[in-house]
Image (cartoon, grey):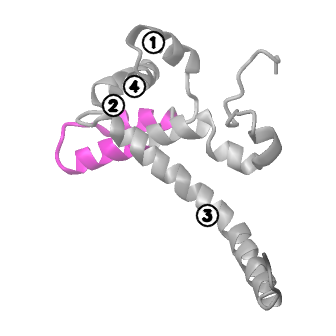
Amino acid sequence: MDSRQKRRDRYENPLCERYASERMQEIFSPDKKFSTWRKLWVALVESQKELGLDITDRQIEVMKEHIYDINYEVAEEREKEVRHDVMSHIYAYGVQCPEARPIIHLGATSSFVGDNTDLILMKEALVLLKGSLTGVILELARFALKYKGLPTL
């Protein structure tokens, strides 16, 4: 990879190199974020089809085919025009799935993908931390019990 290219499989922040695990960087990466948006859009159209909206199996199938091959360049160019990340990714997804373009994000708000993705990623990160946190809490409890009688100033 050229050093000038963005890594999209890792969350990039100056603190990550020092403090974040590889897995945690993956969880908060652009790849994970935007593929989760696409999974949510697929779940939305599947639910809408169940409720009777005129959505074809082919439209859903083509959306599923493009969950992971995110066309960042198209989204970035579109965002320069519309200045809205969700709208630019709807557009980019529609370029990849022209027959599904009319149903992508149908009836939803930006919060549908933004807020739900945040919750999904935070839950995944907390599950990752759960084991470590349990160990830290147990060790802190042992330490506190060991030194509970020690006077401190």
**Residue 28 appears in the rendering:** yes
- Mark positioned earlier in the residue sequence (3 or 4): 4
Relative to 139, does residue 19 appear above or below in the rendering?
above
- Mark positioned earlier in the residue sequence (1 or 3): 1
Label 2 sits on what residue type?
Answer: Ile
The question of residue 150 being in magenta is answered with no
Q: Residue at x 79, y 85 (%)?
A: 142
Q: Residue at x 61, y 64 (%)?
A: 127
- Spot occupied by residue 79 in the image (x, y as percentages of width and height): 46, 15
Tag 3 secondary structure: helix
Question: Decide: marks 2, 4 in contact (CB < 8 A)?
Answer: yes
Q: Label 2: which residue?
A: 104
Tag 4 secondary structure: helix
Relative to 77, does residue 148 appear above or below in the rendering?
below
- Mark positioned earlier in the residue sequence (4 or 1): 1
Q: Which mark is residue 90?
A: 4
Image side of residue 137 versus residue 82, left or right: right
Q: Nearer the viewer, residue 98 or 150?
A: 150
- Spot occupied by residue 17 in the image (x, y as percentages of width and height): 81, 39
Q: Which mark is residue 127?
A: 3
Q: Nearer the viewer, residue 118 or 76?
A: 118
In magenta, the rendered stretch is 40-65
Q: Label 1: which residue?
A: 78
- Spot occupied by residue 146 in the image (x, y as percentages of width and height): 83, 89
**Residue 41 appears in the rendering:** no
Q: CA distance from mark 3 to mark 4?
A: 30 Å
